[in-house]
Structure formats: structure tokens, C-alpha cells
Image (tube, rainbow, N blue to C red):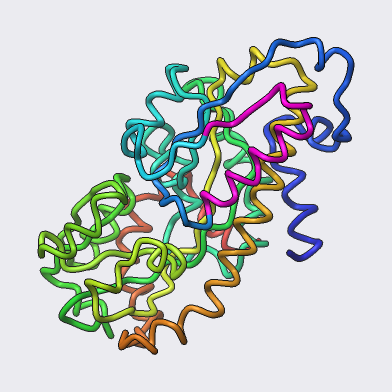
Amino acid sequence: MPIAMGSLRRTFLLGGAALLAAPAIVSSAARAQAARTLRFGHVHPPEGEVTRGIVKAAEVLQQSSGGRLRIDNFPSSQLGGEREMLTQVSNGTLDLCITGPAVLGSWVRPISILESPFLASDFDQVLRMFGHPAIQAASRQLAEGRSMRPLEPWYYGTRHMTTRDKPLRQPEDLRGLKMRVPQAPLFVDMMRTLGAAPTPMSLGEVYLSLQTGVIDGQENPLPTIAANKFMEVQRYINLTGHILVPLLPVIASATWTAMPEADRTLVAQALREGAKVSDALVRQGEQSLRGEFEGRGTQFIDSDRPAFRRALAPLYERYEEVWGRGVFAALQAL
């Protein structure tokens, strides 16, 4: 991971630059606290990059706390879809979840801009965005108004569209296709703007829906496509590269405020170590998976990305009031 990315990460946690910079020392006050297990629910498969990052975070936290703090990992939508789990985090019945800004936009709409199409050129740029006043304000809204505190972002990859029967060279090729999207208004509006029929569903439902023809395609980064075996039931990977995705771990405000500062430090540091593992695996997969997919007969289509960007102009206009006037252009210029 580039050094710049690591330094950018440390600026993110809401009001917590000093907190995140604190050394990983288990103080006597922390040792005196009662043992605690944090339940971490998410939609990612057990063998996926995100899950492996969470497992690493659990190992680090258990070690750094002397076994007093644990993370219990619940992958594959065991506790519900992303919206259901975020509701649980908000009401304090689930400690941790990890999701994209577009899904979080169901609670605080402006934060969805971080997952808007064709916003960023690389993940370092995404990390810089978290220092922008508009993103800081949206993060505070999540913490103070929705009782879920966002922590440092993880890299999820660049999203591409897959289809079963039809390659997507131009935006008009999407017309009428039933495309799975996350349960997030921005993704629904994106697909509608491109002429597709968006079908929101949890990640765990996608494989069977592709297999049975309930949907014609979906969109995700290459490592997610591989981990969920979508290419067993799809033919084309269309290189739209339309969204570069940060994932945000969110912790229940009730959980966060109940922990002493030393424990917050340990949790934040453990999640940072988990992010390093997940990020590295995602980047490795993005570099290596094309050859593996092509060896199995998958066809890669070089979609006309500028045409897709132009086709989404009405989306940007509609969301200007949601995101704040001029914010998209300001983030794009970072």
C-alpha cells in the first residue's frame, strides 16, 4: 500500500486524528475493563477479501487487548441485508457493519456522493475526499443523527458490469436489461438513467437470481465477482469502470460511547490492520483475475466509458441538490 494512502487514512476518523495516532498500548485502565465481544455483520462471502480483512482485524484486536476484546464475524448476510444490518447498528443491536456510501445514503443522502459514478480516478483521491467539509458534515450527521459512526474507509475495487447474453459496448446496450444493484437509491437512479431496469437486492441473492434469469446482469469489482462465482452464470465482463468504491465500517454510537478511549483506539487500529489485508487482496485480484476469467471462457468487453459518463449527465444534475451545489466538481478536482 502506498505511504500516501496510509497517511491519508489516519486523517479520517471523525474528530479522531489524535485518537488514531495513539500507540497500540494496552493501558492499565483498559485492562481493568470487562471483556467485550463486538458482533460484526456484513454481506460478503466467507472466502472474500473483506471477510479476510475482518478476520485479521479480529486477530489483531484479540492480541492487542490481551484477549479481552473480540470480534465475532457474521458473513454472507447471516444477520440480514445491508439495510437491515445498518438499522441494527443505528438502534444499537449490532455493533459493526461495513457498507458503501450509496447504501449509507439511505440514512444521510449527501454521503452517497462518495460512490457516485466516474467521480474518482484512484483510491488516494477517494481518501482525500474524506477531508472535504461536505463529507465531514455528512459523517457527523451519521454519527449524531443516525447513531452510527463511520470509521476509516476500505478499498473495495472498481465496479464493472456483467451480463449473460449481451455485451455492453455503449450505454444504449443496457436498455431493458434487468440489472441487480445494491439496495441504494443512487444505484437505482444510475441504472434508470442508463435505460436499464434496476433490481435492488442483497449480495447473497444475486447468484441464484442470475442463474434463474430473474436478472440479466449485475455490477461489482472483479474480486467480488470472483468470490461470489458470478461468472459461472454470466458470459461478459463489461469494463465500464463506472465506480471506484470505498467501503465504510460503521460502529453503533452506543457501542462507541460505551467504550473507554483506550478501547476505541484498539478497535480503530485493528480495523486499520484489517483494511490493509483486504485492500491488498482486492488490488491483487484486480491485477490477476482477468487472465483467470479469460481462461475459463469469460469475454471482456471494452465498454465506451466516456459515452457512459456522458449518458449519466442527467443523474449528476438531479443529485446536485442532494450532494450540495458544486461538491461533485470540487471532489473530482482533488
Q: Which residues are magenta?
A: 50-72
* Horizontal side of residue 38 vs 74, given as left or right: right
Residue furthest toward the front? 67
Q: How many marks?
A: 0
Measuring from the top left, give residue 217's x and y in whole percent: 22, 67
Question: For the point 30% across and 67% down, which residue is it?
Answer: 230
Tell me which corner region of the image, top left, top right, bottom left or bottom right, holds residue 181.
bottom left
**What's the magenta bit mostly, secondary-structure-wise?**
helix
Along the viewing direction, whichever of 237 and 75 lies nearer the viewer: 75
Quadrant placement of the N terminus: bottom right
Q: Is residue 67 magenta?
A: yes
Q: Quadrant of residue 175?
A: bottom left
Q: Quadrant of the C terminus?
A: bottom right
Residue at point 28%, 46% (across, down): 202
Residue at coordinates 75% horizontally, 52% vertically from top-left? 8
Residue 258: % across, % down? 64, 12
Q: Residue at x 64, y 63 (%)?
A: 280
Is residue 229 part of the magenta span, yes or no? no
Residue 106 vs 202, above or below: the answer is above
Residue 321: give x, y in percent of width and height. 39, 44
In this rendering, position of residue 327 left or right of residue 26? left
Q: Between 75 and 19, which is closer to the camera in this rendering? A: 75
* Residue 15 sits above or below residue 276 on the image: above
Above or below 186: residue 4: below
Q: Position of residue 46 (x, y in %)?
A: 45, 50
Quadrant of residue 161 in the image?
Answer: bottom left
